[in-house]
Image (tube, helix red, strand yellow):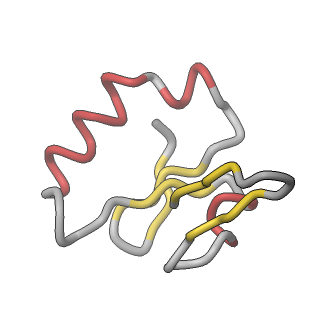
Amino acid sequence: MGVRLLADDLYVAAPPGLSDLFALVLRRNPLRVTPEVFREWVDEKGFGERWPMVQVMEEDRAVIP
């Protein structure tokens, strides 16, 4: 997702859509990162403590960070 500030508007580029963003869902991009690296990154960032409402998705199931 990318956002650009224009003169009096915002331009939002979100090829996969915004539904996960608004639903507070975090998914890995299988083309960019392995499940192990994704899990390590999620644990390192502390998403569960910082944003307890976020659902971290591993494959097709939600896990609690």
Question: Residue 31's image quarter?
Answer: bottom left
Picture layout, residue 15 above or below residue 62:
below
Q: Residue at x 50, y 54 (%)?
A: 26
Q: Position of residue 17 (x, y in %)?
A: 61, 77
Q: Position of residue 64 (x, y in %)?
A: 51, 42
Q: In this orientation, which residue lies closer to the viewer: 59 or 38?
A: 38
Q: In this orientation, which residue lies closer to the viewer: 59 or 45?
A: 45
Q: Residue at x 71, y 40 (%)?
A: 53
Picture layout, residue 49 above or below residue 61:
above
Left or right: 9 with respect to 62? right
Q: Residue at x 39, y 24 (%)?
A: 45
Q: In this orientation, which residue lies closer to the viewer: 6 or 28?
A: 6
Left or right: 12 with respect to 46? right
Q: Position of residue 21 (x, y in %)?
A: 65, 58
Question: Residue 42's image quarter?
Answer: top left
Picture layout, residue 50 above or below residue 51:
above
Q: Residue at x 49, y 51 (%)?
A: 56
Instruction: Give the mark count.
Output: 0
Left or right: 62 with respect to 9? left
Picture layout, residue 14 above or below residue 52:
below
- Residue with the most extreme right position: 8
Question: Residue 35's image quarter?
Answer: bottom left
